């Protein structure tokens, strides 16, 4: 067994770490406070090649692997987890679905700008009445002549509100069979007739991430914008969401590492009873547990990504990584806040932002209950 990163993966970690420290971290507080989308940072992320790490060079990527991709996402999320979320959707989910299921023409047209970061992708599965039970979606697609006509509302859609987000992959039902909805996936450009951005959500955190409703009212797209097998759209989504789970785990590890770094620094600086609070065993034990759990979560997401790179089954490993890391980060963020005492509640300390950012990682791309249901299915055999 070899736990060493390759030279390329080490280079990605260094590049992403420097970028996170120099470009994102100094702006993270301001981005959270103003809610302005950081277009200059997003453009620079594209220029450094972050959106295209796992894609072949012929489609604008750098021909790297999923371990490297996730190391990059961990480092970016350490500075701002919302930007990790941007990478999750555009690269791990949308870019990958286009790469795996797209025709040559679709890959050239839609994947290339996404891999280069000049355009950002969005993923439209969730609806007002279809969250965890995503297959019960109501959005419909009808083939009329040489166009698909889509009707429905998608909610909580990441990225599509960005001005450089060009496309959303929409899951819609085309018919019903004995098993339920037959779901297909469509490449829906933002400028398609009948496409409208709905409300922008007011959120507790992740303000650098754009979260909007998408409304499709007789939205017309060309017949060639069907992505993959028309009867297997849902399965296609689920297969890329498996990678999304590894990505959420990497984001959780990055955010948790930021919590530990801040808590450790504070514990060494803050003096009570004539000593730095780090010298109290109760504080040290919290920090020790944080460090152990972060490392376990890191090893788990790296294992899942490595198995994916080997083309091996990693369903359990990806679910376990997402479940463990997202639950871990909530506890780590809470402990980091606690170590700051009353100052943890004050916006001038980053742990206040980290605490607010952590909880949602247990919800996105499948709640902890959904992850446990998936593990239960695997255990059942
Ligand atoms: C910031 C943000 C960004 C998002 N980005 C996207 C995006 O880009 N694209 C997209 O398609 N979606 C996106 N989502 C949606 C996200 O994936 C869903 O919110 C998530 O899957 C949960 O669905 P829900 O919110 O409808 O909760 P529900 O499914 O209504 O769940 C509510 C509660 O019930 C529990 N529950 C539900 N069913 C069961 C069950 N069978 N057994 C036990 N417990 C159960 C859940 O675990 C949860 O605790 C985003 C959400 C947020 C908040």
Image: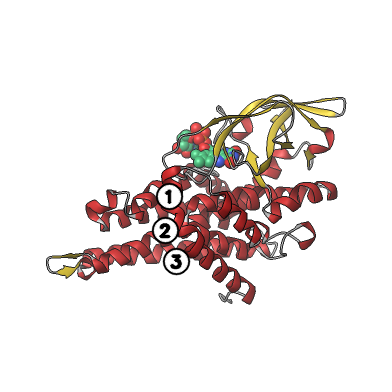
In this rendering, position of residue 140 left or right of residue 77? right
Q: Which mark is residue 295?
A: 3
Q: Residues within 10 Å of mark 2 (few under 14, many from 20)?
A: many
Q: Which mark is residue 180?
A: none
For numbered disc 1, what is the local secondary structure?
helix
Query: Residue drawn at (21%, 71%), measured in percent from left and top?
Result: 279
Q: Residue 30, labelled with which disc?
A: 1
Query: Within 8 Å: ligand 1 and the Cβ of disc 2?
Result: no
Q: Which residue is at 60% across, 58% downward?
A: 44
Q: Which residue is mark 2?
A: 256
Q: Earlier in the sequence, mark 3 or mark 2?
A: 2
**Residue drawn at (73%, 51%), measured in percent from left and top?**
113
What kind of element bears circle 3? helix
Instruction: Tell me the mark number nearer the camera, choosing from 3 and 1.
Output: 1
Find the distance from the CA under tag 3 to the CA under tag 2. Answer: 10 Å
* Viewer-nearest residue: 271 or 127: 271
């Amino acid at each position: 067994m070899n736990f060493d990163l390759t030279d390329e993966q080490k280079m990605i970690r260094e590049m992403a770490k420097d970028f996170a420290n120099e470009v994102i971290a100094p702006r993270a507080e301001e981005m959270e406070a103003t809610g302005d989308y950081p277009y200059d940072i997003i453009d620079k992320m594209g220029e450094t090649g972050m959106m295209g790490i796992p894609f072949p060079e012929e489609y604008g990527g750098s021909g790297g692997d999923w371990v490297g991709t996730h190391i990059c996402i961990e480092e970016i999320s350490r500075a701002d987890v919302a930007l990790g979320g941007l990478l999750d959707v555009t690269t791990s989910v949308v870019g990958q679905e286009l790469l795996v299921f797209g025709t040559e023409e679709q890959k050239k047209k839609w994947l290339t700008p996404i891999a280069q970061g000049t355009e950002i992708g969005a993923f439209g599965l969730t609806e007002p009445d279809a969250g965890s039970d995503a297959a019960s979606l109501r959005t419909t697609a009808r083939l009329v002549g040489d166009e698909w006509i889509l009707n429905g509302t998608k909610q909580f859609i990441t990225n599509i509100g960005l001005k450089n987000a060009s496309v959303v992959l929409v899951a819609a039902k085309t018919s019903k069979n004995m098993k339920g909805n037959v779901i297909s996936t469509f490449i829906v450009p933002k400028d398609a007739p009948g496409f409208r951005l709905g409300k922008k959500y007011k959120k507790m955190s992740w303000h650098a991430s754009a979260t909007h409703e998408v409304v499709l009212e007789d939205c017309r797209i060309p017949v060639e914008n069907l992505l993959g097998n028309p009867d297997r759209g849902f399965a296609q989504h689920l297969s890329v969401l498996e990678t999304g789970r590894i990505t959420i785990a990497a984001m959780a590890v990055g955010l948790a590492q930021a919590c530990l770094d801040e808590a450790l620094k504070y514990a060494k600086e803050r003096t009570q009873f004539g000593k730095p609070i780090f010298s109290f065993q109760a504080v040290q034990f919290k920090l020790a547990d944080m460090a152990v759990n972060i490392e376990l979560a890191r090893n788990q997401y790296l294992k899942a990504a490595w198995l994916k790179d080997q083309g091996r089954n990693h369903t359990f490993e990806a679910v376990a990584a997402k479940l463990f890391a997202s639950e871990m980060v909530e506890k780590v963020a809470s402990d980091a806040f606690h170590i700051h005492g009353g100052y943890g509640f004050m916006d001038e300390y980053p742990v206040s932002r980290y605490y607010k950012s952590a909880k949602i990682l247990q919800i996105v791309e499948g709640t902890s209950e959904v992850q446990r249901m998936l593990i239960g299915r695997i255990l059942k055999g």
